Structures are given as C-alpha cells and as structure tokens.
Image (spheres, helix red, strand yellow):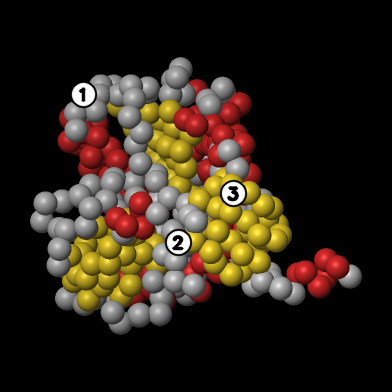
Amino acid sequence: MFSIFRSRHPGTALINGEPVLVDPKETLLQAALRQGIDFPHSCRVGGCASCKCKLVSGRVRELTDSGYILTDEELDAGYILACQSVPKGDVHIEVDLSQQRARQQVAGKIIAQEPLTHDITRLVVQLEEGLAYKAGQYADLTLDCLPEAPRSFSFASPVQADAKVSFFVRRVPGGQFTGRVCGESLIGQGITVDGPLGDFTLRPGAAPLLLVAGGSGLAPLLAILQDALGHGVARPVTLLFGAREERDLYAIEAIQELAKQWPAPFRFIPVLSEAGPDSSWHGAKGLVTAQIPALLEPGAHAYLCGPPGMIDSAEALLREAGVAREHIHADRFTNRSQGPASTRHPVIEHQQEN
Ligand code: FES
C-alpha cells in the first residue's frame, strides 16, 4: 500500500543541480523537456544514446535494456538513458549540455536531388549560414512542406566553406519524408537543418581503421574519410560496404578516388548479399560482416554504420576477435515503423523513416 501511495506522487530530479518535478511513470527526459530544460535527445526510444546522463544518486526503472548501447565503462560509471529511465523516488543526475549549446537550427534551400541508386538520393542543401559539425554527426531535417515530419540523417560530407550540406536519403516504402525527397522535385524548397547531433566521430590515434557500412550507412563514413584525408590522417583503412545487389552500390568512384589519395594502405571491399546466380558480380558475396575476421588488422579500431542487425553482428565478431568495446564505435539506424520501443533494438529514425 505504501509503495502504491508513493508512486502517485511526483518525485524530484536534480538535473545539473536544477530541481525538476517528475510525474509518476514519467521518464526523466519527458519531465526535463516538459519543464523547459534543453535536454539532449533524438530518438526517444533508447536507440541513439543522445540522452545519456550520469545517475549520481537515487534509483531508476529502465524501460529498455541500455546495456547494448552504453559501454561497459559508462554503465560502471552510472550512466543511464534519460528517455528510458523512470525515477524511483528522488534522483540526482548530471548531463553534458555542451552539445546542446552547439546545436543550431539553420534554414536552407534544396539545391540538388541526385539519384545515387534506385532508392537512394543525395540531397544537397544550401544553408543560409554555416553550421559547425564534425564529420560523422547527423542532423534533424524538416521540409517546409512537411513541418510535422522531421527526419534524422547523417551529413554525407565534411563541413564545406560554402555552407552546403548533403545527405543520403533512402526511400522507405510509405515514408512521407523520403517519398518526397526521392520521388518529387523539391528544388528551391525550404528546409531546416537542426544539429549537429551524435558522437559518431573519428577518435584521434594511429590505429588501423576498420569501417563497415550497410546501405545508406555509408554517408557518415564517407564524411569521416574525406575529413580525415583533408587533415592528413595516414592510418591504414579497410572499408567494407555491404549492399544487396549491384544496383544498390553507389559512390564507388568517390571511394576509389579517396583510396588513390589516401596516404596509407586503403582497402575497399564492396560485398553483395543477394548477388544471384545470373549476376556478373565477381566481388565478395554474402553478409558484409562475414568479411570481418579475415580482414581485421591487429589493433584496429572499428566504426560501424548501418542497420541494427549488421551492427550487432559486427560488434559480436569484433569482440570475439579481441577488439575492446571502447574501440568499437557504432551508429545504428532503422526505420521507426519496425518495432516498438520495447524491442531489443529500439528504433532510431536515423537516415530512414516510417
Ligand atoms: S533519446 Fe534516449 S536513447 Fe535516443
């Protein structure tokens, strides 16, 4: 009886020292946003770790298991996901708001829609002013003609001096945003870019790099490589690019050009999972992750971007091969309609949509 009585009353969360009332069953993120705190977040379903914060004192009930998205070190240090944490009584949390301070909403116009494959379009936006981001990060995009449907996409190139930004948009069946971008001319239309978001960025070091991309997950990895080339990074690179069929491959020339200029060994291996018996494809076949054990260089650090299944499989193989958790960086994406927040792979509408 006592616990039922208590659960009907709001608790208090001290967020960076600021008291916030949390209604029963409310998550920390919901309470913070409701009371005007610009708490970092994106997916709201436990899939992106944008809302990561440190539980200094108190206890929370977790709606989904955060163990697969937070590192062992973060879990040991008491990190939780605010969007998945319902306080059990009063709590004290600390959150890094520096990224929020850097976040900007910049208006722009669509200046190009270039089909890359039958279902992926490169969207190029001329911003009204420059937006500072790091290669590998992403932004929320809102079309003026679709104000209720912001969607998240990775920047597909490093910061340009001319304030142009580009994104790879894959058409999702029934998707409002992607249907417009991939199916209609939007040249001259207004769009707002809200970011930067995420921390999928290249960490400093000299270790060889293993990059694994699935589908439109190539975007942040290309941006990272182009940016690294511009900064004189000379680490050996192995880039695995998984696609279904030959018609799903794109940006091949850009990658080959990168490889030519790269000042250290650069291996590029496109892998097709559905190259049929009639296919003229002579390259690697099967799941892209199956290539990892043979191509992993000793001491390599891994950067993975693609659907959750690919990431999970790559992470398992890398861990099995002895790569430390802190040297595996992953950016998962999938589409919002694939499952509820309670599934093991909570959905982040990153690069895709419902
Ligand atoms: S907003 Fe909480 S994990 Fe994405």
- Where is mark 3, residue-wise? 55
In the figure, is residue 250 to the left or right of 292? left
Please, what is the three-letter code of the amino acid marked with disc 1? Pro
- Where is mark 1, residue-wise? 263
Residue depth check, mark 3 versus mark 1: number of the one nearer the observer: 3
Could you tell me which secondary element the residue under label 2 belongs to? Answer: loop
Could you tell me which secondary element the residue under label 3 belongs to? Answer: strand
**Residue 146 vertical position relative to residue 107 in the rendered view, above or below:** below
Question: Which corner quadrant of the image does residue 36 belong to?
Answer: bottom left
In the figure, is residue 91 to the left or right of 120? right
Please name whichever residue, 63 or 5, is drawn nearer the observer in this view of the structure: 5
**Residue 212 vertical position relative to residue 150 in the rendered view, above or below:** above
> Where residue 116 appears, x then y in whole percent?
29, 56
The answer to whether residue 222 shows anywhere in this view is no
Please, what is the three-letter code of the amino acid marked with disc 3? Leu
- Where is mark 2, residue-wise? 39
Q: Callout 2: 10 Å neighbours few (<14), some, many (20+)?
A: many
Please name whichever residue, 107 or 345, is drawn nearer the observer in this view of the structure: 107
Q: Earlier in the sequence, mark 2 or mark 1?
A: 2
Q: Are marks 2 and 1 in contact (CB under 8 Å)?
A: no
